[in-house]
Image (spheres, rainbow, N blue to C red):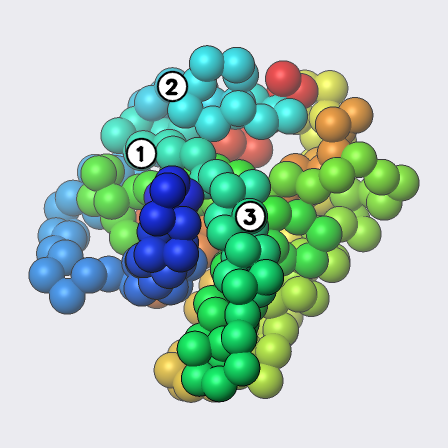
Amino acid sequence: MQVRVGTAGRVVASAALGAMVLTGCSDTAEPDAKVSPTASAGASQDAAGAGRGGSIGAAGSACELPVTFDIAARWEAEAIDAAGAEAAADELKDDGAEGQDGLDKELAAEIADSLLRQGPVVAACEVDAKPAGNIGFLRVFTGEPGTDDARTVLEAFVTAEESDEVSIGKQDYRTFRSGDLTGVEVSYLRTSEILEETKQQHALAVTTADGPVVLHLGGLDDEEHKAMLPAFELAKRTLRVS
């Protein structure tokens, strides 16, 4: 999902952020979304085999990133204009006023920041699994160059997901190597107190001269998450510095 901010900054930002709440960041299906078991199985087989759908990260690709990696067949990547959305959020804060309207603008700005930023990194790219038959996303987050190693970045990313409504448990961290990169991956359980459900999550982090990069895989439920794991493994296996 690409968050665009044009001349009607407030309206576009609010609409885009609302869409991210409903479809993007929640990994929740639209009411009329239907995915057959056959489609899910086919997508998993494509990702598990050599069914690569191209590479992203390099200049000119759908998402320009500090790293490149292959995405699974039929998955679709789209850049997230975090800078534009954050600028719109700042505009909302600057234009805030006393009363209900001012509170609404401040809330919209806070939502923008919470959706785009998680710990030390900011959303940069979203790879959608729905065209391949699954409901979920592989999301890419990037950060500013610094001295933190991959483990520190990843732990901060996971910790930042915790709130009064969300708890994190059963974290399993492991080191991996891909090409010239050494990174850290984690599998963990995310529990939503509001929805009263616990779901499996996977993420990994690497550091580059241009800053840290985090890849995160969620999913509508554990079944969808398991079906999409081969796409996460494909990305990890082909991860390289841009």
Residue wearing tag 1: 75
Quadrant for residue 27, please give it. Answer: bottom left
Closer to the observer: label 2 or label 3? Answer: 3
Q: Residue 54 carries which label?
A: 2
| Residue shown at the point (46%, 14%) measured from the top left | 60
Q: Residues within 10 Å of mark 2 (few under 14, many from 20)?
A: some
Q: Which mark is residue 87?
A: 3
Task: Name the foreground residue: 118 vs 217.
Answer: 118
Distance Cα–Cα, label 2 vs label 1: 9 Å
- x and y percent of residue 53 in the render? 33, 23
Residue type marked 1:
Trp
- x and y percent of residue 136 in the render? 34, 52
Task: Name the foreground residue: 85 vs 25.
Answer: 85
Tell which circle, 2 or 3, labels the residue nearer the N-terminal end. 2
- x and y percent of residue 118 in the render? 62, 57
Tell which circle, 3 or 1, labels the residue nearer the N-terminal end. 1
Label 2 SS: strand
| Residue shown at the point (40%, 50%) measured from the top left | 9
Whether pointer 2 and pointer 1 mark residues with C-beta atoms closer than 8 Å, the reply is no
Distance Cα–Cα, label 2 vs label 3: 31 Å
Residue type marked 3:
Ala
Residue 116 is left or right of residue 17, and the answer is right
